[in-house]
Amino acid sequence: MKLTTVREIYKNKEKYIDTEITIGGWVRSNRDSKAFGFLVISDGSYFEQIQVVYSDKLSDFNKLTKVNVGAALIIKGTLVATPGAKQPFEIQATHIDIEGESSSDYPLQKKRHTLEYLRTISHLRPRTNTFQAVFRVRSLIAYAIHKFFQERDFVYVHTPIITGSDAEGAGEMFRVTTLDPSNPPLNDDGSADFSKDFFGKETNLTVSGQLNGETFAMAFRNIYTFGPTFRAENSNTTRHAAEFWMIEPEFAFGDLNDNMDLAESMLKYIINYVLENAAPELEFFNQFVDKGLLDRLKNVAESDFGRITYTEAIEILEKNNNNFEYKVSWGCDLQTEHERYLTEQVFKKPIFVTDYPKAIKAFYMKENDDKKTVAAMDCLVPGIGEIMGGSQREDDYNKLLARIEELGMDTKDYDFYLDLRKYGSTRHAGYGLGFERCVMYLTGMSNIRDVLPFPRTVGNCEL
Amino acid sequence: MKLTTVREIYKNKEKYIDTEITIGGWVRSNRDSKAFGFLVISDGSYFEQIQVVYSDKLSDFNKLTKVNVGAALIIKGTLVATPGAKQPFEIQATHIDIEGESSSDYPLQKKRHTLEYLRTISHLRPRTNTFQAVFRVRSLIAYAIHKFFQERDFVYVHTPIITGSDAEGAGEMFRVTTLDPSNPPLNDDGSADFSKDFFGKETNLTVSGQLNGETFAMAFRNIYTFGPTFRAENSNTTRHAAEFWMIEPEFAFGDLNDNMDLAESMLKYIINYVLENAAPELEFFNQFVDKGLLDRLKNVAESDFGRITYTEAIEILEKNNNNFEYKVSWGCDLQTEHERYLTEQVFKKPIFVTDYPKAIKAFYMKENDDKKTVAAMDCLVPGIGEIMGGSQREDDYNKLLARIEELGMDTKDYDFYLDLRKYGSTRHAGYGLGFERCVMYLTGMSNIRDVLPFPRTVGNCEL
């Protein structure tokens, strides 16, 4: 069908004013007064809607006045400028076809619904203003990330979803299996016999693509992953989901400073892309969801991010220990209250905290010369706290092997990873960005369930 | 580190000739003759490699002559034009640092390895020419797909990976669970008690995002998915993997013709993007992997795809029944031999076959007026057969409900899907592109295991 989209009309209105056009879309509201009816139509292509005026000169005027919210219409008419009105133009309809009716029990009547209620109708909530804005921005952020890395010749790698190993030795995992669920084959010792499973071994859903990604970075130099990751954690918070998407860039011949440079320019690139391509959506968030959003995003896009070591951060935080629920001292992990204090109160802009104690960070991070800290970095932003985390990787074969053994991990599982340090090892680094946390940050939405199209959390797997 | 990439040198050689540059990369070969040594270096940024000449004026000349294949080096020197030589330039080294040694047991010595062998070292095979080409092209195709849809204002939707329903009622699925693998909780009837599982019900890995995608198309008009999908099929062929990626566009206010137009222009766009951005890789495939590749791709990019109905296709095929292993008649499904005959022998270009018998297609496809066929389409291309499949969707509530009941499916599972036909239903359509099949098509690689970074097939889940 040759239809003009509402996006196209808003973008090139000069071209369409006083011409006849045909649009297709869904009714957001329908009211009539005597000889005229007024429809507000969303066609999904653009955040803004368009008003359609129809008169009783249309033969089916009476039928049209009874069209319910949610119905799909195909509308032919003339686009007319409406100077002084709220909207810059309207369509004066010459013909309206009812493509699909709606009924009076349509769950999205023209009134304010709570986000909690909308979560119960995840197949319909994308039709509301809030979720039109959220999911379009989500799509734009995803594309901005691809664009950023592809413009810099990073190779996109699809690291595997089903994995035979526990990448970081961290996090509860989901098992993937085709064994009989009620009567699994057993070994002599009573454990499940995974040799009979689909892959001939126990397999799980990935918690990170990093280790696989590193194998590609040692071949392509610059790579990134962007795929779903999973945590079977029984935590019911506004920031945790069982299924979420993650971006994990990794690059060879680079160190922790290069890593911070890359992360900083990526975040600024994303923000600028969304500011440019989703202006009406961001205006909406700024007005209805998070009042300071636009200022905060613009501030981040224009700031040079601060950079301090963990040790320096602890010195600053210790002076404020009276005001923290969790008191800090060297060696402890930072809580959100500490992170937000640093970025919001002390620096008033995003910062990187680097060189954390070895004991609280992952085995693969590069040991610093002090032997107490590792070349880790966390990026903290106002309003959120940590948004990205990464490190330079241990590239010394012997040190890495010793660390794996020291932590009681099975070296056999890491043969491939150790090989990267045996054959042409080079300094390399990378970081992870939780995609949903990024979407929350750019929209001001405060519950991860509201930035995931179909959220999966403990006890919830609808549709 | 400030290094110049080999890609940058090839792209802007005028800028770098006769200047001093520093590169980092991995040794592909190292030979010496008397006073000179010759390194071939790949830095992973570009398919082509670069030659480095080092002389015995370097203090560590002897050490350098012993550097093994696979080692990582950082090389400083002058880029010098070499007119008449195979490569357009070389680096005359003034200083070489060994960043990471390699040893003589490096599995990728300078000789031809079989693809089968390389599959056993999936962490190292990206360092070979073939897989440098495959995985860079894979990345470029992925980006071309995003670019195509984003330029047309399609919204990218992350449909869920873990699902509580069997989307198409088709295909063996992987179960996702956190229940005790050897001693699962049981109901009174002896079946597994999934109410105790993480999500409180039985969950599986998705086989398609289409039904979820449709809910977004009825809000955003134009959407696409691009994510991993899964089949627990015990089939050990060169074309099947248990984990693969799929693209599923879906759009409202469009019919089967619009669907074919979209699919055709997408495929051409991808081909043109790769021809423009991966010329050396495609030359390589054309020379070493699949001799007719470039001609075939250019032919596809320039053809108007043919369009015939299934009924017409059967008439053509029946005339050739003597030469088919499987004889055709109206009502049967088409085999690869039939598909290839149509596209390769009859049309000599890609074609769409449309309007298949209702009985052999999925429940959600729109019934045609003849009540025997549905508005389905398969896109067949020379050398492969089917590469995309899709349909206009049944948008009539009563017809869809009747079909779901007729097939004995549980209507409760499809309440959300039926709602889309209840509230503002509109004609809509979409298709699925198997991403790996597309990568195989554009590279000429004949085994799906060789276009997946870490392939998962029955009995195989390495790394």
Image: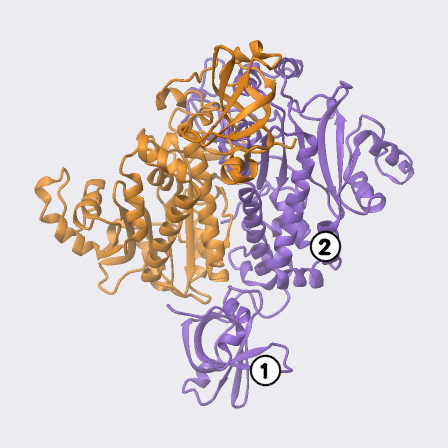
Chain colours: A orange, B purple
Instruction: Give the side of residue B362 with respect to residue A358, left or right.
Output: right
Badge 1 vs badge 2, beta-carbon distance below 8 Å = no
Q: Amino acid at mark 1?
A: Thr
Counting from the top left corner in percent of width and height, residue B119 is at 59, 54
User: Above or below — where is B53 with respect to A242?
Assistant: below
The disc at residue A155 is: none
Q: Amino acid at mark 2?
A: Lys
Question: Which sits earlier in the primary sequence, circle 1 or circle 2?
Answer: 1
Q: Who is closer to the viewer here, B69 or A24?
A: A24
User: Above or below — where is B4 with respect to A88?
Assistant: below
Q: Who is closer to the viewer here, B8 or B185?
A: B8
The disc at residue B82 is: 1
Mark 2 highlights which residue?
B298
Q: Who is closer to the viewer here, A246 or A305?
A: A305
Q: Residue at x 65, y 39 (%)?
A: B262
Residue B200 visible in the shown view: yes
Counting from the top left corner in percent of width and height, residue B123 is at 51, 56
Of the 4 image quadrants, the one containing the N terminus of chain B is bottom left
Mark 1 residue element: loop
Distance (Cα) linking label 1 and label 2: 33 Å
Q: Residue at x 56, y 36 (%)?
A: A16
The chain ID associated with circle 1 is B
Q: Who is closer to the viewer here, B314 or A99?
A: A99
